[in-house]
Structures are given as structure tokens and as C-alpha cells.
Amino acid sequence: MAMRFVIIGGGPAGNTAATHAARLGAEVTMIEKDVVGGAAHLWDCIPSKAMIATGGTLARMGKASGMGLREVRADLDLEVLSARIESIEARLERSTVELLSSQGVRLVQGTGRLAGPRQVVADTVEGPMEIEADVVLLATGSRPRIPEWAPVDGERVLTTRDAYPPPELPEHLVVVGSGVTGVEFVHMFSSFGCQVTLIVSRQQVLPGKDAEVAAALEENFLDRGVRLYKGARAVGIEKDADGVAVLCDDGRQAQGTHALLAIGSVPNSESLGLEAAGVEQRSGYVVVDHNCESNVPGVYAAGDLSGKLPLSSVASMQGRKIAEHAMGFHGGSNRHLDYEKAASAIFTVPEIADVGLAEADAFAEGRKIRVTKVPFSANAKALIENDSRGFVKIISDPATGVILGGSIVGRRAAELISVIALAVTAGLRVQDIHESLLVHPTLAEALADAAE
């Protein structure tokens, strides 16, 4: 009898686990209540990047003279942009459903919950459906965090999911939260011509990131007229018919027409039946081991619900590893996920990407490292494309030359970081990159130069 593999949640983790387990011979059932492909993926990540792409096109057209062209004027059409986003989401969902169906995955529309370690109930429009399972994967994702002091109404005070795009283009947007999501919204709406104020609870944007990287982004924001309220923690929002005032704990107030919250997320775990099944959780996240398995054998968690890195790429890989482990194809410690080697990117302009060991962390640990850095201002392709902002930084072991990490600030950083990520994962040396015969002229040549 085939293994009965039941998945609650159709995001990147659930989709990858479903297709992989089906290929390995499992009988797979997926329960999804909203959108196959993942709410966080299709309602957050994809729309935000589509809006950023539109803003980038506007910005490039505004700099046409630098490419030897006459200036071209373009205006944002929110209705057309909204339709474009919906079209992209629909195409991605359709392709995901087609892939799952081609693998024989049974799709159930409804809300899934555990009735026991091996029993799942799907609440559907036709009523509850009981499903016996040998393996259960919980991958229900997360939602934007809304503090008690924030009167979110979807019009003046927005969460991230109210802003893809918003009902109207803000004249002056106050963004609360200077992490990855917050700075992407600052960049996005600034590109659309909005005045933007950013509430920064610490002394730099992107807390936890390389200070040099954060400084480069702050400089760009200031050049674009963004106002930074550093060392200010939001504690309240007042609103009226004309606008909002974000109140800070140091007495300052940020005035604007709209406010947007980008202060993290909370896991969707309240109605999963975790207590009934005896699944251990911490602050709403399922506690998992290196195989993403909970304390209850056969019950796994992945994606945002696992409390690990909240990245779609990580969720997908977790799904694959879970399918392998559950089906008995997991081959040893080298097969486990190393979250410290996950590449991440921030889609601002300039783009920011990093992977592996950070320079500040190495110094804090007293670890000896070699840091090499090359600016894009010395790169021919960057000059050709009229955007030489940023740099490539590679961190390596001075004794062996093994690449430990790296950061990139600049055009197409999210693509270029893949080379360093591969080097970190495979244990390559700086010499391996330096001696690679790369195409000229390309931005990737900066990687070889930094490795020299």
C-alpha cells in the first residue's frame, strides 16, 4: 500500500513536498483554503516584486538621458498595474495546479487540522472530510503581524497585503519597520513618486545586516528624499479624514497621508489541532528537528510555520527534504539543510544580496577572515548600463582560501549572489572563481575581481 502523505497548506513547501513525494511513490493529498501556490508567495512576494519592477521601469525612463536618449514621460496606472499583478498570480497558480495534477496529487479545497497524529480533518463547503495519513506536513504559512495600537482599516492604515497595490497611491506614506519588507516598500513607493518616511527602531535600516550594506541603502534613500526616523519605535497611530500620525516612543510624530505596517508576521497555527495531536510548539511555531520533523513522529512542519528562515527558497527545499526523509530516501547528515548557507536578497535599488558568514559576525566571534571588495564603478558592464552603484564583497578563510560568505550591493545582485552561494555550499575557494573564464563585459566579472 502506498504511503498516505497529507499536506495542509499549498505554498512553496507544500507544493514541492507534494510533487517530490508523489514521484517517490506516495499517495498525496493537499488541503488548501485560499490559493494554490501559497498566500505569502502569491499575495506578498510576487505582487511586491511586480510593483518593484514597474517602479524600476519608471526610474529607468526618468534617466533615459544618461543612455543617450531623450527623456520619456510615463505615468503610473494603478488599475493596469493591479490587473497585471492579478494576471501573474493567476498564471502561476494555474501552472502549479497543473503540475500537481500531473503528478496525481489530490487537491482538497478547505481548512485542514489534526484530529490526531495520523488523522486529518478537512473542513470543506460540503462538510468535514476525514483523511487517514501515514505522514502529515503542516505548511500553513504566516500573516502580517498587527499590534494592538495599530488601527488597520485597509484604507489609511495598511498591512502589506493591503498594498498590492493600495486603493489609492499615497501622497505621503509612513512605513513602520525597517527590515527587508519595510525597505522594499520604501523603495517601491518612492519609485512611484510618493513622499516616504521610514520609522527605524534602531540606528540603521536592515538591523542584523552588514553595516556597510545598510549604509549604502540609507544613502540611496536620503538621496531620493526619504525621511528616516532613527531610534524611534512606533507605539500608536492616530488617523483622521486627511491623514495619519505615527506616534513614536521618543515623542516624535511622523505625519503622512497613509501608514503601512511592515513589522513581521505571525504563524497560522491557531486552528491546526496541534494540542490535540501532542505537537510541541513555541510562540505558535512548530518545534522541528534537522529533518523538519516535530516531536510527534510522522508529523512535519515547513515554511514560515517551522520558525526557520522565512524564505520561499528555504520552504521549497524543506518540502523536498521532508518528502525524502518521510519516504526513506534521506541519506545522512550531509543531506540536512544548512540554513546558514541560504542566500537572500532585498529588491531595492540598488539590490542587496548576501549569503553565508557575515563580516560583523566573524569579528564578533573572533574568527580570522579575509575580506576583499570591488566596487561596480570599476566594472565595464555597470558603466555601460549607467548604474555603477554598489560593490561585491567576498569573505574567505585566509588559510585555505575557502569562500565563507559574501555580500553584493548593486544592479542584479539577487542574480549574482547565486555564484557565491554555490561556492559557499560546495566549499569552493576564491581561486576557483578567479580562474573561471567569465563572459566580458558582464557584471559577474566583479566577482572574479573580488576573488583575486
Image: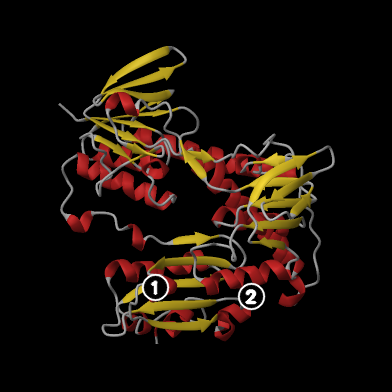
Would you call the spot at circle 1 few (<14 residues within 10 Å), some (14-19), or many (20 or more)? few
Work out which quarter of the rendered image holds the N terminus and state it. Answer: top left
- The spot of residue 349 in percent (x, y) is 62, 65
Q: Is residue 334 above or below residue 150?
A: below
Q: From the image, which quarter does the C terminus lie in?
A: bottom left
- Residue 364, which numbered label? 1
- Which amino acid, mark 1? Ala
Residue found 39% across the figure and 44% down from its top: 303
Question: Residue sitting at 49 percent across and 70 percent down?
Answer: 210
Q: Which residue is mark 2?
A: 387
Q: Distance from label 2 to label 1 (Cα)?
A: 34 Å
Mark 2 crowdedness (10 Å alpha carbons): few <14, some 14-19, many ≥20 = some
List x then y, in percent, for residue 11. Answer: 43, 39
* Closer to us: 70 or 253: 253
For discs 2 and 1, the disc positioned in front in the rendered view: 1
Relative to 199, 193 lies left or right: right
Q: What residue is rendered at 60% in x and 62% in y?
A: 348
